[in-house]
C-alpha cells in the first residue's frame, strides 16, 4: 500500500510541519496556559474562557467544508498563507482585548484561522499536490507537529512569565507573520491546474458504498471526542483512578512521546499496509488502556497514557490518509471538511460532557463511555474493507 515519496516532498513536509507546529501551539494548545491569567484579569471564571475556545472550535467546524472547497479549486498555498494572517489577527485581538466580550470575539477570529490553517487544510493541500502519494507527507507533517504541545506549552508559559499573557499572544502573532507565513507562501508549491489534476492517472476501482462517509464520520467524531476529553481531564481522571498528583503529571507527559512513537511506526512499519489496518489497531489503544486503569487503578496511569497516546497519534494520521485511500484525491478538501465537522463539534463539547460524567458517575462511567465510542468505531472500520486498488468499500 505504500507509495514512493514524491519529488521535493521533504522540503514541503519540513515547511508544513513547522508551520503546523506553530499553528497548533498558538491556537488549540493556547488556553491550557493562558486561560487562567486571562480569566483573572477580566474577573471571570476559566470556564468562560474555555467556553469561548469551544465557540472557536464550532466556528472552525462550520467553516471547514467551505475552506476545503476553496483548496480543491485553487490549491492550499494561498489558504494556508491567509490562515497565518487570520490567526495573527485573532492573537492580536486577544492581546488587545479590553473585556470578556472582546476576548470572545478574538477567539471567534481564531476559529476561522483554525479552519484555514490546521491539519485538514494541510492534508487537503498535500492531496492536491501529490494525489494518492500524499500518505507519506501527511504522516511526515504529523510527526513534526506532534511536538506542538511539547513546544507550545513551555514557550507560552515562558512568554507569559516574561511579558504577561497579552505579550505572549502578541509574540505568537509575530511568529505567524515572521516564520509560518513565509514557510507556507514560499516553500509550499502552487497546486497544478484542475484540468491537470483531473487528467492524472488513477487506479480503477469501484466506487465506495454510501455507508462509507457516515461510518468514517462516526469514527472520527468518536476519536476526536476522546482526544478532547483526555486533553482537558487527563490529570483529574488519573487522580480519580488512584494516582498521585505527581504520577498523574508524569503519566501525562508520556502522551506526546507515545503519539510520536506510534506515528514513526505508521511511517515505517505500517505504511506498507492499507490505512484501515493502522486505524483499526489505533482505535483499540484507548479501551485497552482504560481496562488497565479500571482494573489496576493508579499504578496503571502510565500504561493508560501510553496506550491512549499511541492510538490518538495514529488516528490523527488516519484522519488524513483514510479518506484519501477510500475516495482518492478528487474533492478531498470539501470531503475532509464534511468529515471533520461533526468531529470538531463533538470535540468542542467533550471537555464539558466528559467532566460531567466523571463528576456524576466516576471513572468507570466516564471511561466506559469513551471506550464504547472507541470500540464501536473499530467495529465501523471493520465494516469497511480494503480494495486492492487502494479504495475502500463498505462490507456487503
Image: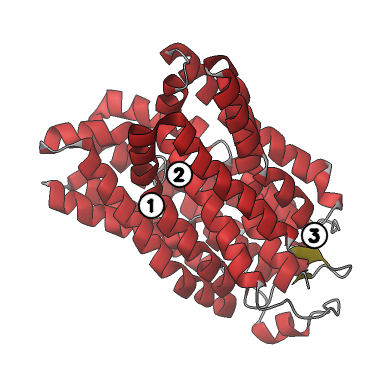
| Mark carried by residue 348 | 1
Residue 121, picture quadrant:
bottom right
- In the image, residue 256 lies at what x, y percent? 57, 31
The first of marks 1 and 2 along the sequence is 2
Q: Is residue 252 visible?
A: yes
Residue bearing the label numbered 3: 7
- Please name the residue shown 51% across and 68% down the image: 337
Numbered badge on residue 228: 2
Q: Quarter of the image for the C terminus: give it.
A: bottom right
Residue density around tag 3, few if under 14, some if 14–19, many if 20 or more, within 10 Å: few
In screen coordinates, is 116 left or right of 89?
Answer: right
Is residue 135 rendered to the left or right of residue 105?
Answer: right
The image quadrant where one finds the N terminus is: bottom right
Mark 1 crowd level (few <14, some 14–19, many ≥20, 10 Å Cα): many
Q: CA distance from mark 2 to mark 3?
A: 36 Å
Give the CA separation, mark 1 to mark 3: 38 Å
Amino acid at each position: 500500500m505504500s507509495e514512493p515519496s514524491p519529488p521535493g516532498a521533504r522540503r514541503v513536509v519540513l515547511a508544513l510541519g513547522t508551520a503546523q507546529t506553530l499553528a497548533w501551539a498558538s491556537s488549540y494548545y493556547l488556553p491550557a496556559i493562558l486561560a487562567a491569567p486571562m480569566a483573572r484579569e477580566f474577573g471571570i471564571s476559566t470556564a468562560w474562557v474555555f467556553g469561548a475556545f469551544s465557540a472557536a472550535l464550532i466556528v472552525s467546524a462550520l467553516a471547514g467544508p467551505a475552506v476545503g472547497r476553496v483548496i480543491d479549486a485553487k490549491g492550499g498555498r494561498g489558504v494556508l498563507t491567509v490562515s497565518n494572517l487570520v490567526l495573527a489577527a485573532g492573537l492580536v485581538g486577544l492581546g488587545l482585548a479590553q473585556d470578556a466580550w472582546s476576548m470572545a470575539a478574538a477567539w471567534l477570529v481564531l476559529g476561522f484561522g483554525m479552519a484555514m490553517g490546521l491539519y485538514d487544510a494541510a492534508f487537503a493541500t498535500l492531496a492536491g499536490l501529490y494525489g494518492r502519494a500524499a500518505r507519506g507527507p501527511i504522516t511526515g507533517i504529523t510527526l513534526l507537529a506532534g511536538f506542538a504541545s511539547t513546544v507550545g506549552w513551555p514557550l507560552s508559559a515562558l512568554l507569559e512569565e516574561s511579558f504577561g499573557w497579552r505579550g505572549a499572544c502578541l509574540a505568537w502573532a509575530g511568529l505567524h507573520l515572521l516564520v509560518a507565513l513565509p514557510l507556507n507562501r514560499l516553500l509550499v508549491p502552487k497546486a497544478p491546474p484542475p484540468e491537470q489534476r483531473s487528467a492524472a492517472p488513477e487506479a480503477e476501482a469501484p466506487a465506495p458504498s454510501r455507508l462509507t462517509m457516515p461510518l468514517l464520520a462516526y469514527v472520527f467524531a468518536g476519536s476526536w471526542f476522546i482526544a478532547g476529553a483526555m486533553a482537558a481531564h487527563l490529570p483529574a481522571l488519573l487522580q480519580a483512578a488512584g494516582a498521585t498528583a505527581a504520577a498523574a503529571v508524569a503519566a501525562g507527559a508520556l502522551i506526546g512521546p507515545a503519539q510520536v512513537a506510534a506515528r514513526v511506526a505508521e511511517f515505517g512499519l505500517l505504511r506498507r499496509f492499507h490505512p484501515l489496518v493502522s486505524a483499526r489497531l489505533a482505535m483499540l489503544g484507548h479501551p485497552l488502556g482504560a481496562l488497565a486503569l479500571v482494573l489496576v487503578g493508579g499504578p496503571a496511569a502510565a500504561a493508560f497514557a501510553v496506550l491512549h497516546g499511541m492510538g490518538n497519534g495514529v488516528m490523527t494520521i488516519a484522519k488524513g490518509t483514510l479518506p484519501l485511500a477510500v475516495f482518492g484525491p478528487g474533492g478531498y478538501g470539501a470531503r475532509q471538511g464534511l468529515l471533520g465537522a461533526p468531529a470538531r463539534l463533538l470535540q468542542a463539547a467533550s471537555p464539558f460532557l466528559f467532566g460531567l460524567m466523571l463528576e456524576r458517575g466516576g471513572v468507570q462511567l466516564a471511561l466506559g463511555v469513551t471506550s464504547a465510542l472507541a470500540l464501536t468505531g473499530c467495529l465501523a472500520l471493520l465494516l469497511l474493507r480494503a480494495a486492492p486498488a487502494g479504495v475502500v468499500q463498505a462490507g456487503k
